[in-house]
């Protein structure tokens, strides 16, 4: 078998340095380009095939359950194929993975469309509940067997869309959205904290889905907005306290398991978050993720926290009915909190 060392032995000593550069040259970049070409080609070709198949069903005026049956067959075949292609070489396996990703997304879409179409004709008043339950099972059942981060993220995010649709249909959008966002953040933060690759898609979907009610809070005018204001103002402080307790327990437990828990490190997070109580929940979410990003030296989580922080401060700035001077002081204080947070993290060795 010919390998790199065998090739170098056959080359003259004066040419070995150049040969080493050639043999070790940008193999990863080349493989990345090939992956992009293979991935786009496989995914697009599969999508066109499934679109043609869907067109046949539409023009044949098939019922909703025909779509659901087709989707179930395609999804089962995709999962079965995913379990059997693990022994392929990297190139063919990547190509097949993109085909199977398109297949399972098509299958789940057909199942969801078929079930919703059926219930829309017969019991339209529970269509959101049916969609939420269907999306939950479509995300949960194949999760362990189909190890695609894109499929897992899309499935969980779609489920969260129906959760928020149910909340919007309920009518208490302003006061209930904060509770749902709190649960989403706690689940997402916990999945990030576990540091397991399989749970990362859930974490990203949960945290990013919080943008749905945030956007609605900015652009939608509610019918009973004033009725919830006094109640929500009290509940927001309750949510903040729940969040602080959760985060304190998580970091303290992790420090205890690693054997480096002491009084100073145990008080860092709760003290900082208590000082941030005057701010809104998005800012506190961002600060918590920022701590987590530095704690695990994870650049992606840091970037996510900065994005949420910018949005939270902007929303806080424009939603407060106070003078410009007071808003400026608030921005100054928020900056000082961030600087204090970074200095404390650096002092205790977390800001690497």
Image (cartoon, rainbow, N blue to C red):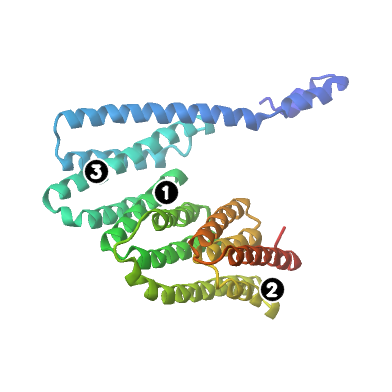
Instruction: Give the camera-side residue of 310 and 64.
Output: 310
164 with respect to 198 (left or right)? left
Q: Residue at x 45, y 76 (%)?
A: 238
Classify 10 Å Cα crowding around label 2: few (below 14), some (14-19), many (20 and above): few
Say which quadrant the N terminus sits in. Answer: top right
Where residue 103 appears, as percent x and y from the top left, is 35, 36
- Secondary structure category for the residue under label 3: helix
Classify 10 Å Cα crowding around label 1: few (below 14), some (14-19), many (20 and above): many
Q: CA distance from mark 1 to mark 3?
A: 19 Å
Classify 10 Å Cα crowding around label 3: few (below 14), some (14-19), many (20 and above): some
Q: CA distance from mark 1 to mark 2?
A: 35 Å
| Quarter occupied by residue 79 | top left
| Label 2 vs 3, first from the N-terminus | 3
Instruction: Give the camera-side residue of 330 and 20.
Output: 330
13 with respect to 257 (left or right)? right
Where residue 197 appears, as percent x and y from the top left, is 52, 52
Q: Is residue 23 above or below residue 164?
A: above
Residue, far right: 14
Q: Residue at x 30, y 40 (%)?
A: 107
Q: Are marks 1 and 2 in contact (CB under 8 Å)?
A: no
Residue bearing mark 2: 260
Residue bearing mark 1: 152
Q: Is residue 78 above or below residue 295?
A: above
């Amino acid at each position: 078998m010919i390998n790199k060392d065998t090739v170098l032995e056959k080359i003259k000593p004066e040419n070995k340095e150049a040969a080493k550069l050639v043999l070790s040259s940008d193999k990863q970049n080349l493989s990345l380009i090939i992956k992009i070409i293979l991935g786009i080609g496989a995914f697009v070709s599969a999508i066109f095939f499934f679109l043609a198949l869907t067109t046949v069903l539409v023009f044949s005026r098939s019922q909703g359950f025909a779509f659901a049956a087709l989707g179930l067959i395609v999804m089962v075949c995709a999962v079965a194929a995913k379990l059997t292609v693990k022994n392929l070489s990297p190139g063919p396996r990547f190509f097949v993975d993109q085909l199977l990703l398109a297949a399972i997304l098509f299958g789940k879409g057909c199942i969801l469309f078929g079930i919703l179409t059926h219930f829309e004709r017969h019991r339209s008043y529970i269509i959101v509940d049916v969609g939420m339950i269907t999306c939950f099972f479509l995300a949960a059942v194949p999760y362990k067997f189909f190890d695609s981060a894109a499929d897992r993220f899309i499935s969980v995010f779609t489920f969260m869309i129906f959760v928020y649709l149910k909340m919007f249909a309920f009518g208490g959008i302003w006061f209930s959205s904060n509770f749902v966002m709190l649960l989403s953040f706690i689940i997402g933060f916990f999945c990030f904290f576990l540091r397991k690759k399989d749970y990362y898609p859930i974490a990203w979907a949960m945290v990013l889905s919080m943008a749905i009610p945030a956007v609605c809070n900015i652009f939608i005018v509610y019918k009973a907005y004033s009725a919830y204001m006094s109640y929500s103002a009290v509940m927001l402080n309750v949510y903040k306290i729940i969040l602080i307790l959760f985060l304190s327990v998580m970091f303290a437990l992790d420090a205890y398991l690693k054997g480096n828990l002491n009084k100073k490190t145990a008080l860092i997070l709760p003290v900082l978050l208590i000082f941030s109580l005057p701010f809104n929940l998005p800012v506190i979410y961002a600060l918590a993720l920022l701590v987590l990003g530095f704690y695990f030296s994870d650049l992606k989580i840091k970037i996510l926290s900065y994005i949420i922080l910018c949005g939270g401060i902007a929303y806080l700035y424009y939603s407060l009915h106070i003078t410009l001077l007071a808003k400026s002081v608030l921005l100054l204080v928020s900056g000082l909190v961030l600087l204090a947070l970074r200095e404390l993290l650096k002092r205790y060795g977390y800001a690497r």
